[in-house]
Image: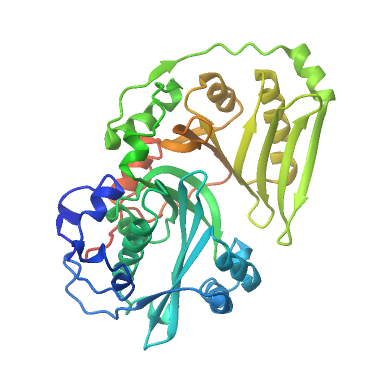
Amino acid sequence: MLSNKLISKPIITINEFLELYDNKFSDNLEKLLHLDFKLNLNHQYEKINPVIHLAKPEDAKKIAQIFKDIYEGTYPYKQMEDYQEIKEMIKSSNYQWYLLKINSNKTVGCFGTYLEFEKKRGLLFGFVIEKQYQNILDSLKAFIGCLIYIWSTYKNKILVWFGEIRTNDPTPQYATSLCSLRPIAFYPNKDIFLNNIESIFLHVTYDEKALLEFRYKRIPKIIRQVLDCYLYSNNRFHLGAPLVKNPKININLKKVSTLQTRFFKRTEKDKFDNEIITFSIKKSVSYFKFLYNQNLKTIEKTNYKITKLEELYVYLQELNKFITKSHIRYIECFVSSYKPKHQKIFFNAGFKPRGYVFSWEYNMLHKVFEDRIVFNYYEGEIDKNIKLIPETLKLLKVLNFNAYRKTNFFKG
């Protein structure tokens, strides 16, 4: 039985979460797929318990149809509506899909994971239930059962797990926080669901090894504008104080002018009109790479390497031109917590820090996790009626989004 410690004590790591269930699952994880356990969470009402199945390639059409039906053909990440893409995911060792079934074999929902084994990081996504079953299926128990199974199966292989949680409903925020996936960064106006612009929270959880054993021992160096984000995250993980810096940025404009003449842009497009765009400078190993989602008008998965500050300055100049030309609504960048000059250049270019993520990027050469800072930029007004739980409300206040109110959330 899951302990009521789930509601009496905040859970910090995956290890603490897994300790809350009886050891009867350690030798027979398949029992979890039948949800053969009880929750002690003031669960006073009876709901249908689904059985969890590992998806097979032939299930891809059903998964795609669920996404099409729930989001009425407006899901912003179009690969989720394409059964061939989902079929390839199921075949890949880097993905694992789960089906929620009732009445022996009726599929009523699904859940996906993306496993980056080299980075020791896993993405949780696509937990959806068909509309007619959303209020009668025990989705909380199904979600918790999936996580116990996933985190037990990939223990010591994946040490950091994360998910992007919507703000249209407080229940997913509550459910993820309950399982140690807690809000750590805010993505204002990032997504569009059912034709409505919506903000997102990044929720992250860790195996304790990612924080205590494999985290980079170097003390973070951050600019003053990042300090509030750091303190918010450190209040949860208690990993020590940073060094606060105010570096002077001396950009050689003559070098900038020369680099601009050697600037080069390369674009690769997929069948969904997403573009992987790479900025580079001839005769340099530097680059600035990102994913441009034309459907959403967003930029994410940003990655860069530079040898001098002038290169980063040029790349961000060109990025701002691209933002204006392509009418970009939202962009995010994960910036090193050990390079305050980079942070300041991003800040001066109009990006704001909206989350400090401990042990985020795995350095395969040195076998350590490095911290990152979420810098992002957005257009438009944020919905004043976004649905929050106390923890996400606290994060917004730290980030100086003070106009938002707490709403009722999952009551068990």
From the viewer's perspective, tell me whether residue 250 is left or right of residue 128: right
Nearer to me, 108 or 351: 108
Q: Position of residue 256 (x, y in %)?
A: 75, 18
Q: Is residue 74 visible?
A: no
* Number of numbered callouts drawn: 0
Residue drawn where x is 15% and y is 60% of the image: 3
**Picture coordinates of residue 317, whole percent (x, y):** 71, 28
Among all residues in the image, which is located at the extreme bottom?
103
- Side of 45 where 339 appears, left or right: right
Colour scheme of this structure image? rainbow
Q: Locate residue 186 relative to residue 178 in the image: left or right.
A: right
Residue at 20% in and 60% down: 21
| 9 to the left or right of 267 | left
The percent coordinates of residue 300 (x first, y second) are: 60, 45
Residue at 29 percent of width and 81 percent of height = 48
Q: Is residue 135 depicted above or below 5 in this figure?
A: below
Residue 94 higher or lower than 207, as above or below: below
**Residue 330 position by quadrant:** top right
Using the image as rendered, state which of residue 35 and residue 280 is in the foreground: 35
- Please identify the quarter of the rendering in which residue 108 is found: bottom left
